[in-house]
Amino acid sequence: MDISTLIGIIGCFAMIVLGIATGSAGITGIMLYADGPSVLIVVVGSWFALMTFSSIKSAVSVFGIIGLSFKVPHFNERDIITKLMAMSEKARREGLLALEDQLEDLDDEFIKKGMRMVVDGTDAAIIRDLLENELSQMQGRHADNISIINMWGTLAPGLGMLGTVIGLIGMLANLQDKDALGGNMAVALVTTLYGSMMANLLMIPIAGKLKTQDAYESSIKEMAVEGILSIQAGDNPRILAQKLLSYLAPKTRDQMEKDILKD
């Protein structure tokens, strides 16, 4: 689990509650910010607007997409590099066909598909095109997920303003009740607060995290493509490792280079 997502959300809401509690309204003033109709307008209303923007299926799946931000993606770069190095070594000694027995040991379906094409003698340009097309399709799906989260973050503040206008209309319709003006104004503004919180505390940060995850997974798959084509080209395993290590962050690369290329 990606604990930073949970800590970030809890921390944001905690600071808002603490700010309210330590302000002029005090602890008892916290309940001024709890309003059921505002939740219906901002949260539920913006979710139905999201359904209008996309589809029922996409609107329902948005909660699963949000759940992805709580997961830490693991691709085990070290294992990928060492397995590709071992396959490169074997291919140089025994030929590409000798790799067929090792394909079932590969956990990554993307790499397995690429290596299957190598063993079958598929042209390098075709392998690259097919794997890059699969990578592009994955990035497209991720972009759609990020887009729908960003859209919810865009719609929520608008529904918040709409709720505020609704509240103000109700307040202005009862101007004769001067004692209730302050309370009605506060409730009217709560919807704007909810919309802003949804966008800036939840949706925009979550979309940003999903974008980071997409970049990470894309980099790993690009690294795999390079390794697969390097094996087909008959590169030395150490040269292959240097190519793959270049895709990693400098600190990770330096440490892994010491372990993998220590000979």
Image (spheres, rainbow, N blue to C red):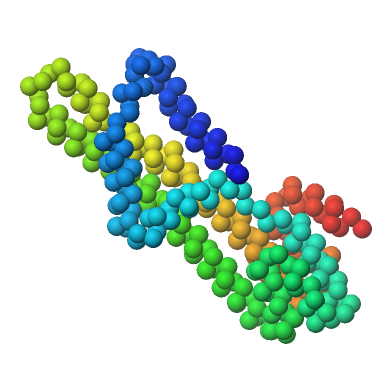
Furthest toward the left, the residue is 176
Comparing 80 with 61, the one in front is: 61
Q: Where is 173 relative to 153, above or below?
A: above
* Residue beneath the point at 27% across and 41% down: 41
Q: Where is 42 relative to 104, above or below?
A: above
**Which quarter of the figure has residue 125?**
bottom right
| Side of 245 relative to 72 (left or right) | right
Q: Position of residue 163 (x, y in %)?
A: 24, 38
| Side of 132 relative to 15 (left or right) | right
Q: Position of residue 110 (x, y in %)?
A: 65, 69
Q: Quadrant of the image for the N terminus?
A: top right
* Residue beneath the point at 42% across and 22% down: 19
**Which quarter of the figure has residue 172?**
top left
**Which quarter of the figure has residue 81?**
bottom right
**Can you see residue 10?**
yes
**Can you see residue 236?**
no
* Residue beneath the point at 43% across and 56% down: 61
* Residue beneath the point at 69% across and 71% down: 112
Q: Quadrant of the image for the C terminus?
A: bottom right
Comparing 240 with 74, the one in front is: 74
Q: Where is 77 relative to 176, above or below?
A: below
